[in-house]
Amino acid sequence: MMELLYGLLTGICFGFFLQKGRVLRYDKQLAALRLQDMTIVKFMLSHIAVAMVGVYWLYDLGLVKLSVKPTILGGVIVGGLLFGLGWGLLGYCPGTSLGALGEGRWDAVWGILGMLAGAGLYAEVYPFLSKTVLTWGNYGKITWPQVLGVNHWLVIVPLVAGIGALFWWLEKHEL
């Protein structure tokens, strides 16, 4: 039960940050897709950096256990194309469509209905996909530190520094 409560609290906090960062706005979404406004890129990268440091810090303290999913290029490529197509057509990604609906934007309902239909369709075609697309480029449960044969902090620290450098560059050369 506590895991569900933690998930709910984390989701509420994330929704709060989505709203405060103004990334739920349709115009921000389209400007990001057109590379005219980097607010959403900076928002996503900052959350990735914080989550990466936080999860591995908790892991090192023995408070969490990692559950690495297999790297399957076929699924990643097809899923990424479908995700990008839906985002480009609708102007919302799944998380922002829920947040936008919470702000009263009824056009986000199309995104939510699309997510539900997509999940149902995926469940129906999963037996076929598991024998085809989900076998293409299956590298198993790997991480960059494992591939490089180094401690995870030797990957995390340069990535966080790179994100910081990108933020600095984007602020200096805002599109």
Image: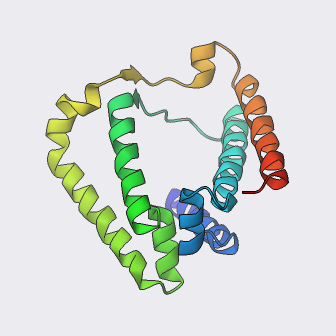
Vertical comparison of 4 with 84: above or below = below
**Position of residue 168 in the picture relative to residue 135 (left or right):** right
Instruction: Out of 16 and 89, give the one closest to the viewer.
Output: 89
Q: Is residue 59 visible?
A: yes
Q: Total of numbered circles in the picture?
A: 0
Instruction: Out of 14 and 84, give the one closest to the viewer.
Output: 84
Of the 4 image quadrants, the one containing the C terminus is bottom right
Query: What colour scheme governs how the chains and residues are painted in the rendered image of this protein?
Result: rainbow
Quarter of the view holding residue 145: top right
Vertical comparison of 150 with 25: above or below = above
Vertical comparison of 99 with 158: above or below = below
**Position of residue 120 in the picture relative to residue 21 (left or right):** left
Instruction: Out of 3 and 131, give the one closest to the viewer.
Output: 131
**Position of residue 9 in the picture relative to residue 122 (left or right):** right
**Position of residue 79 in the picture relative to residue 133 (left or right):** right
Q: Is residue 25 visible?
A: no
Q: For the point 75% across and 27% down, which residue is it?
A: 153
Instruction: Out of 3 and 71, give the one closest to the viewer.
Output: 71
Q: For the point 69% across and 69% down, which residue is it?
A: 21
